Image (cartoon, rainbow, N blue to C red):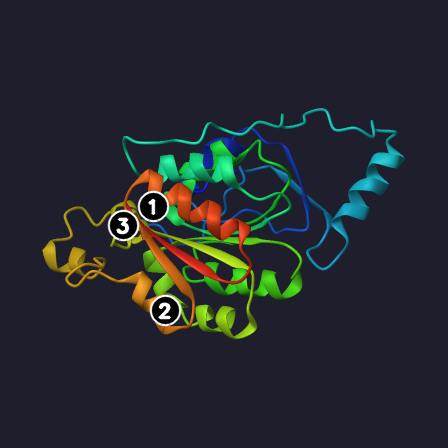
Amino acid sequence: MPYFAEDMVEFLKGTEQLILVGTKPPVSFFAYPGKPGWLTPDGCETLILATAQQDGVHALEALASELNAPAAPALVQQAARPTLPTGGQFNAHTIGAALGALMPENAIVSDEAATSGFACYAPTAGVAPVDWLGLTGGSIGQGVPLAAGAAVACPDRKVVCLSGDGGGMYTLQALWTMAREKLDVVTVVFSNRKYLILQVELMRVGAGNPGRRALDLLDLSNPDLNWVQLANGMGVEASRATTQEEFNHQFAAAAKARGPHLIEAVI
């Protein structure tokens, strides 16, 4: 489903029945003035096949068996990796393409890249199967500790953490846990030096022209954050990428090595 509430309303328009498996009914995660909080259309019937505390996979398998549904899925994503980008621009889109080209097999992705993360979905769609752990709403700060938890739970798998610099600042102490426990996590910080998702939300609540002082509260420059030093201070090896070639080299090396590593991608 789309991320923003108004897009989700449009996506669900005309839905007559919604069957939930391991999740709750879709609602807006902020109270937007003049916009609905409950996102299913009037008259839509909501049925719960399995709650989040129940075995959703088993419930779907039982349902398929009862209905004699085909065992093979009707739509399977074709395996395809994008060409590794070189030269030219260096931004969230080219980083997404590099991740698609270099993503380790059987990886676990902890995604809290927020505005930058949208650029990573399409180019990574055809990589070898990975588990992709996304946001559970409008939270900020879950990405780095979620990656640490995934690495503790699955020490035999590479974990890739995609984090915005704003979100990462909420919980960067999880880097110390990665160093202490020698967790196999590559953290990519999309460093645009602003809380861009909060700037977007400020516009979406109808703030109009909020003024310089309000925007300064969502700015992460003056001084710029130095994620290499922040990571080093927590005991994590780190590097900074300002070009596509630097990022390609750093991510490829970190993906092959074991232990925690952070890449500050300055975009």
- The correct choice, above or below, for 68 with respect to 202 in the image is above
Q: Position of residue 225 (x, y in %)?
A: 25, 62
State the separation of the CA atoms marked 2 and 1: 46 Å
Q: Residue furthest left?
A: 212
Residue 94 falls in image quadrant: top left
- Any part of residue 5 in sight: yes
- Any part of residue 4 in sight: no
Q: Are marks 2 and 1 in contact (CB under 8 Å)?
A: no
Label 1 environment density (alpha carbons within 10 Å; few <14, some 14–19, many ≥20)? few
In the image, 168 versus 17, the foreground residue is 168
Marks 3 and 2: which is nearer the front?
2
From the image, tell me which residue sits under label 3: 192
**Residue drawn where x is 46% and y is 32% of the image:** 10
Mark number displayed over residue 34 = 1
Residue type, label 2? Asn
In the image, 122 versus 79, the foreground residue is 79
**Residue drawn where x is 78% and y is 42% of the image:** 60
**Sequence-earlier tag: 2 or 1:** 1
Q: Position of residue 119 (x, y in %)?
A: 40, 37
Label 3 environment density (alpha carbons within 10 Å; few <14, some 14–19, many ≥20)? many
**Residue drawn where x is 65% and y is 62% of the image:** 155
Element class at badge 3? loop
Element class at badge 2? helix
Mark number displayed over residue 232 = 2
Quarter of the image for the C terminus: give it.
top left
Q: Are marks 1 and 3 in contact (CB under 8 Å)?
A: no
State the separation of the CA atoms marked 1 and 3: 31 Å
**Sequence-earlier tag: 1 or 3:** 1
Label 2 environment density (alpha carbons within 10 Å; few <14, some 14–19, many ≥20)? some
In the image, 40 versus 186, the foreground residue is 186
Element class at badge 1? loop
